[in-house]
Image: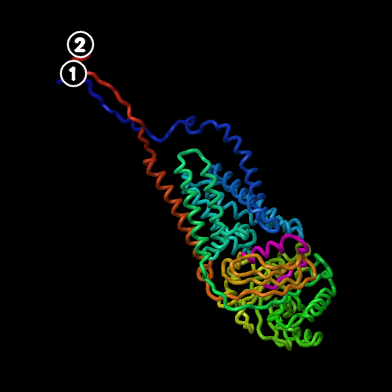
Amino acid sequence: MSRMLRTLVVYRRTSSVQPDDARKPTAAPSATRWASAGPVLALAGGLLTSAAFRPAGLAVLGFSGMVAGTWALRRARGWRAGALVGFLYGVGLFGSLLVWSLRFGIPAYAALAGSQALFSAIPGALAGSASRGRLAWVTVTAGSWTLAEAARARWPLGGFEWGQLAQSAVDLPVRAAAAVIGSVGLSGLLVAVAAAVVVATERGRPSRRLAPLAVVATLLAGMTGLGLLPWTAPSGTLEVAIVQVDPPCPGRTAVDCPGEQEANLEQFIRSSATLPDSVDLLLWGEGALSGRSPADAGQEVVDRMGALPAPLLAGVTSPTGPDGFFNRNVLYDLQGRMLDSYTKRHAVPFGEYVPARNVLGGIGDVGRLVPRDMVRGTEPGRLAASSGPVGTVSSWELSFSRDVRDAAAGSHAVVTLTTQATYERAQVSDQLLAIARLRAAELGKPMVIAATTGRSALLPAGGGDGPATRLFGSDRLIGSVTLTTGRTPFAVFGQALPVLLAVAVTGGAVLGSRDCEATTRLRGIRLHRPVRLRLATRSSAHRR
């Protein structure tokens, strides 16, 4: 054999079991700083996000808050840290957004804001324990947020859709995407954009850092473009007159304001007496005719003011037995005869009924302020008006996309009767109008909001802004809305499309990241770098 060196490659195979010192490295200074800065940043991010909602409507600040929240979440390690970050972000968001609920007391405010913040902890926990891969992490974060919003829309006590991130985007062109993926889908895409911006600022090759942002931006642009397609078409116009009154007891309920119903009715009649002949539909808000049966209410109005200047749609609250009442939207002809009606289906917890009354009815003034429970209707609100079918919902049903979607099916417009007398000049009226714009974008239908007091508005199909009354005062709004026919993708599929998509992409990202980790570990056995040993032949050693 020639005298040459032979190379023997020896692979060492070692167990994954390592000494305790190797398993538990000393915490780095950056990790220590994160432990205190991360939760604070998450809380501040939630507060900033709330600035994007009405009445402020500061979209730039709102998006900065989303980025801050996802930045904090990106640096959370483990589901516990992620859940804490998500919860604190929710505390900042809902604690600021729902401050109007303080009118019902600190316990009610804390219970409402805290329960909604808990839903934010769910995507936080999933994102905190997800793969650190950029695209997989963005997918899990956005998908789990979508699922959390869909869950809180239905649970507990019938759900609560107030404060969806999509409601902060009603002034942006991206609201058109709601026609395809609804409000929960749009919320998920907004979170995806914020998360993609965060990973784009990390170290690494630009092509890898920016890939998630490019994917998300393309998806958002595509959904917005699809939403702008003419899914619905004009089918005529409707001349509407809304009468809004000035309540005699601002900020107080009817129980604590004797004579309020009579004073409001007098204002309704006086303001409606001089309407132009062109009006097709007269609207009085929720509870405008209270304490009467629907038939008696219409007859009383005609007896006091003569023939109505136009068909009237008014809110009628009437007792049924000693323990219940109906909340209806009733359509009358010019002689006060009832033509059609809708009975409210979605009751307000602790406002129109007391859950577990035997247990909770004795807390504070709950039993006195809500002495009866609302009897729920069973059919969606679709009324046969002279101009064609009109959908209708009552008050906070407007905040639930499924309720408005039911009412809009086969209708040319959706009319909401509401009242915000209890909230006076709080943010709730402006937030409700923003929600109405999102419903108009989802369904491609004009939205008409008639408030007994608060703020009324005429909103076009597609979710654009429209004329509105002044806040919390006597006013009258007369205008025309363009009716539409047809159905958007959201009107057809509802939330099923974005929820199923969120389940698929989130589940796929989680399973894919786990498989990737498993293949690199090889069941706890790792292959280390080969050790090269040079062995010389005996003859070569002898020559040396």
Residue 188, position as x, y percentages in the image: 54, 56
Q: Is residue 433 magenta?
A: yes
| Amino acid type of the residue tagged 1 in the rendering | Arg
Residue 269 drawn at (x, y percent): 80, 80
Residue at 85% in and 73% down: 258
Spot occupied by residue 414 in the image (x, y as percentages of width and height): 63, 74
Q: Label 2 is placed on what type of residue? A: Arg
The image shows residue 521, relative to residue 61, as above or below, that is above
Q: Is residue 287 left or right of residue 177?
A: right
- In this picture the colour scheme is rainbow
The answer to whether residue 313 is seen in the rendering is yes
Q: Which comes sooner in the sequence, label 1 or label 2?
A: 1
Secondary structure beneath dot 2 equals helix
Q: Nearer the viewer, residue 464 or 108?
A: 464
Which residue matches tag 2?
543
Q: Residue furthest left?
A: 1
Pick the quarter of the image with the N terminus.
top left
Please tell me how crowded label 2 is: few (under 14), some (14-19), or many (20+) other residues with Cα within 10 Å. few
Magenta span contains residue 431: yes
| Residues at marks 1 and 2 touching, judged by CB atoms closer than 8 Å | yes
Q: Is residue 81 visible?
A: no
Q: Which residues are magenta?
A: 416-437
Mark 1, residue position = 3
